[in-house]
Image (cartoon, helix red, strand yellow):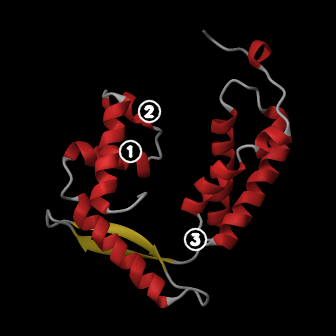
């Protein structure tokens, strides 16, 4: 059934938005480089919500709409405050060079964190190339293309449960709670 603005419109208050604060903060925590950036992104996200809350038509879930608004705010923030990057070329198991970008250290960053990040990139690269192709596809769609589980399932024509199990496999292989 098609949902028109008239029969699905709902009045959303800022208090309704605040109910999703911990979810939104968790999402931005994965994007931000530090707590200060996370707070700035949250503030930008809330400013954008205040500007566009009247435009929310109710034809999608509030949480999904907020996710898009806050993610766009984070991207805009990062573009405006982008640290210089350097491309690292790491030889994969197939002998080809894979490119990874890493942030260059600024005056406030600690060199040990940069080394740790480079070690993590090397670990991910080595493990990723050992994954079966089916797992690589799901991981790339989820983390490079930022697709939802259902979208991945539709693209690959597999059940959502299979998407989840392949991502779980990847998480276990990396030994991380989240990629």
The label shown at residue 160 is none
The label shown at residue 33 is 3
Q: Quadrant of the N terminus?
A: top right
Q: Position of residue 159 (x, y in %)?
A: 33, 27
Vertical order, 57 against 138 (above or below): above
- The front one of 103 and 127 is 127
In the image, what residue occupies the spot 57% across and 71% down?
A: 33
Q: Quick check: marks 2 and 1 in contact, CB under 8 Å?
A: yes
The nearer-to-camera label among 3 and 1 is: 3
Task: Judge the density around disc 1: few (<14), some (14-19), many (≥20) Cα neighbours within 10 Å.
Answer: some
* Cα–Cα gap, marks 3 and 1: 23 Å
Residue 163 quadrant: top left
- The front one of 150 and 105 is 150
Q: Position of residue 5 (x, y in %)?
A: 76, 18
In the image, what residue occupies the spot 64% across and 43% down?
A: 68
Q: Quick check: marks 3 and 2 in contact, CB under 8 Å?
A: no
Task: Judge the density around disc 2: few (<14), some (14-19), many (≥20) Cα neighbours within 10 Å.
Answer: some
Residue at the left extreme, as displayed: 94
The label shown at residue 141 is 1
Q: Position of residue 36 (x, y in %)?
A: 69, 72
Report the side of 141 relative to 6 (left or right). Answer: left
Element assignment for label 3: loop
Q: Position of residue 122 (x, y in %)?
A: 29, 73
* Cα–Cα gap, marks 3 and 2: 28 Å
Q: Is residue 72 visible?
A: no
* Cα–Cα gap, marks 2 and 1: 9 Å
In the image, what residue occupies the spot 60% across and 90% down?
A: 107
In the image, what residue occupies the spot 21% across and 59% down?
A: 129
Element assignment for label 2: helix
Residue behind mark 2 = 151
């Amino acid at each position: 059934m098609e949902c028109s603005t008239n029969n699905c419109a709902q009045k959303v208050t800022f208090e309704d938005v605040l109910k999703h604060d911990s979810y939104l903060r968790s999402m931005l925590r994965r994007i931000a480089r530090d707590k200060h950036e996370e707070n700035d992104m949250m503030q930008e996200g809330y400013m954008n919500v205040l500007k566009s809350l009247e435009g929310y038509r109710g034809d999608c879930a509030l949480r999904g709409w907020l996710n898009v608004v806050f993610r766009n705010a984070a991207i805009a923030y990062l573009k405006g405050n982008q640290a210089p990057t350097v491309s690292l070329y790491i030889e994969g198991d197939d002998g080809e060079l894979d490119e990874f970008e890493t942030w260059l250290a600024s005056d406030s960053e600690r060199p040990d964190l940069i080394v740790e990040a480079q070690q993590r990139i090397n670990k991910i690269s080595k493990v990723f190339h050992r994954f079966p192709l089916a797992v690589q596809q799901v991981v790339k769609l989820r983390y490079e293309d930022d697709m939802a589980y259902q979208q991945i399932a539709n693209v690959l024509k597999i059940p959502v449960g299979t998407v989840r199990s392949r991502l779980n496999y990847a998480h276990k292989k990396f030994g991380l709670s989240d990629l």
